[in-house]
Image (cartoon, rainbow, N blue to C red):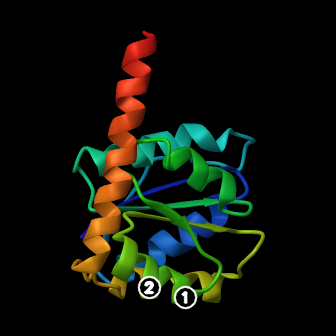
Amino acid sequence: MKIAFGSDHVGYEMKCEIMAYLAEKGIECTDFGPYTTDRVDYPDYALAVANAVNQGAFEKGILICGTGVGISIAANKVNGIRAVVCSEPYSAQLSRQHNNTNVLAFGARVVGIELAKMIVDCWLAGQYEGDRHQIRVNKIAEIEKLQDVAEGACS
């Protein structure tokens, strides 16, 4: 499994710890930045990770900012991305099982490192169930298509 990582300056240290944690488990992690704690804008890194996942270069992405909210909103602007912000493991697992999420976000100011590891573990362990959930995921994809048409009409 290959996971793309990104953060802002607030999430930088936790990102490094989570990447090391997953690397110990044999999971390939690629850091899309930032590479220091210097102040940055999270949408830049959300876009890089979301594009990498959407293009199929990575199976999943993990994003970390102060709360996880802003970075997940930015990632969800990319068609094909279903990013979820989670502060506990149960929602992370169900987001995979029911929504086939492909990007996980959480906040370094909201969860501690051990809880973050549990959230990541549950998210990665979750298996998409399809079936009745696929109908809903398809409807989300249809909304994206409507947005593409609306944008094209205004160009």
Name the side, left or right, on which 87 lies relative to 103. right
Q: Position of residue 32 (x, y in %)?
A: 45, 47
User: Is residue 40 among the parts visible in the rendering?
Assistant: yes
Q: Quadrant of residue 105?
A: bottom right
Above or below 103: residue 86: below
User: Is residue 120 among the parts visible in the rendering?
Assistant: no
Q: Position of residue 47 (x, y in %)?
A: 48, 40
- The circle on residue 112 is none
| Numbered disc 1: secondary structure | helix
Residue appearing at x 67%, y 58% in the figure: 69
- Residue type at mark 1: give it: Pro
* Circle 2 Cα neighbour tier, 10 Å, few/some/many (<14 / 14–19 / ≥20): many
Name the side, left or right, on which 47 lies relative to 127. right
Q: Looking at the image, do the residues carrying marks 1 and 2 touch, with CB atoms under 8 Å apart?
A: yes
| Numbered disc 2: secondary structure | helix
Residue bearing the label numbered 1? 89
* Circle 1 Cα neighbour tier, 10 Å, few/some/many (<14 / 14–19 / ≥20): some
Q: Quadrant of residue 25?
A: bottom left
Q: Quadrant of the C terminus?
A: top left
Q: How many marks?
A: 2
Residue appearing at x 30%, y 47% in the figure: 54
Residue bearing the label numbered 2? 93
Residue placed most toward the observer, 38 or 138: 138
Residue appearing at x 49%, y 42% in the figure: 77
- Residue type at mark 2: give it: Gln
Residue appearing at x 34%, y 56% in the figure: 139
Above or below 54: residue 28: below
Q: Position of residue 89 (x, y in %)?
A: 55, 88
Q: Position of residue 45 (x, y in %)?
A: 53, 43
